[in-house]
């Protein structure tokens, strides 16, 4: 299986990244990494949106502007690691999502409101950690799951999280170990 690791962990020694690396090791598949700290996707602004439209119109889908989308559509498994920031995902991950949701390249519409995938992606794994308790899963995992279900027809999902890492008196290593055991159990199934 062709795995693409989307790394949205910017902190040195990121615990979310450590969990993702644990998953990837257990997974045993070779993988390609896109480090969003080094390879930032620019927010889609007026100029970017116009350029994207013109390139698509001209059929120039091999333009570097579509590098993320072309890389994404060839992957089969997407592993995303992102910390819980401001009750959601870091903006740099949202910016990335805007570079892969492209009508005519990664999906298209077969009827008015019926998207069909143009990608090979069939699995999403999302890994996150939070300093406190996450108020819900909807603003991070829930959002990503909706994107992958709706545009890319993905049905295979896995979600791993470690919470309360920064609370007073917390023992983060114990909490992370518990999440590693959940990853072990997932592979043992
Ligand atoms: C910019 C920023 C925003 C954060 N927002 C939240 C938050 O809303 N709720 C929470 O519980 N923790 C929050 N945290 C704490 C992180 O979720 C926590 O430290 C996490 O484990 C960081 O992951 P990392 O070790 O992979 O960087 C925030 C941390 C940062 C740096």
Image (cartoon, rainbow, N blue to C red):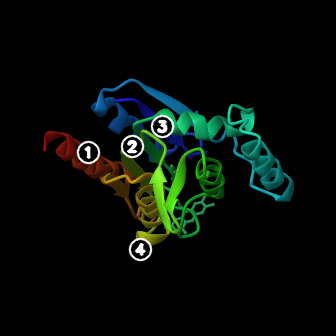
Q: Using the numbered discs, state the Cα–Cα distance from disc 3 to disc 1 in whole angstroms.
A: 16 Å
Q: So how many labels did they put on this image?
A: 4
Q: Is residue 130 visible?
A: no
Q: Which residue is farthest left? A: 189
Q: Tell me which label, 4 or 2, sits earlier in the chain.
A: 2
Q: Point out the residue furthest to the front here.
A: 111
Mark 4 or mark 2: which is in front? 4
Reading the image, the residue beneath label 3 is 5
Q: Is residue 183 left or right of residue 14?
A: left
Question: Which dot, 3 or 4, sits closer to the camera?
Answer: 3
Q: CA distance from mark 2 to mark 1?
A: 9 Å
- Taking 82 as reference, is 23 left or right? left
Find residue 169 and report its image quarter: bottom left
Q: Which residue is mark 1?
A: 183
Label 1 with label 4: CB-CB less than 8 Å = no
Distance (Cα) linking label 4 and label 2: 20 Å
Q: Tell me which residue sits at (47%, 46%) in the image.
A: 80
Q: x%, y% of residue 105?
A: 59, 44
Image location (x, y in percent) of residue 14: 52, 44
Q: Which residue is mark 4?
A: 136
Whether label 3 touches label 2, CB < 8 Å: no
């Amino acid at each position: 299986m062709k795995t693409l690791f989307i790394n949205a962990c910017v902190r040195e020694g990121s615990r979310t990244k450590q969990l993702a690396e644990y998953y990837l090791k257990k997974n045993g598949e070779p993988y390609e990494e896109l480090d969003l700290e080094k390879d930032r996707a620019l927010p889609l602004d007026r100029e970017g949106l116009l350029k994207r439209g013109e390139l698509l119109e001209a059929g120039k889908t091999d333009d570097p502007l579509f590098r993320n989308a072309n890389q994404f559509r060839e992957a089969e498994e997407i592993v995303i690691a992102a910390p819980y920031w401001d009750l959601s995902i870091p903006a740099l991950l949202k910016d990335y999502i805007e570079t892969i949701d492209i009508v005519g390249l990664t999906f298209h519409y077969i009827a008015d409101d019926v998207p069909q995938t143009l990608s090979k992606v069939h699995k999403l794994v999302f890994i996150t950690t939070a300093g406190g308790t996450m108020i819900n899963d909807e603003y991070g995992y829930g959002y990503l799951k909706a994107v992958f279900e709706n545009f890319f027809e993905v049905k295979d999902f896995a979600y791993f999280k470690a919470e309360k890492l920064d609370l007073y008196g917390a023992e983060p290593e114990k909490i992370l170990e518990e999440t590693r055991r959940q990853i072990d159990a997932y592979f043992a199934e």
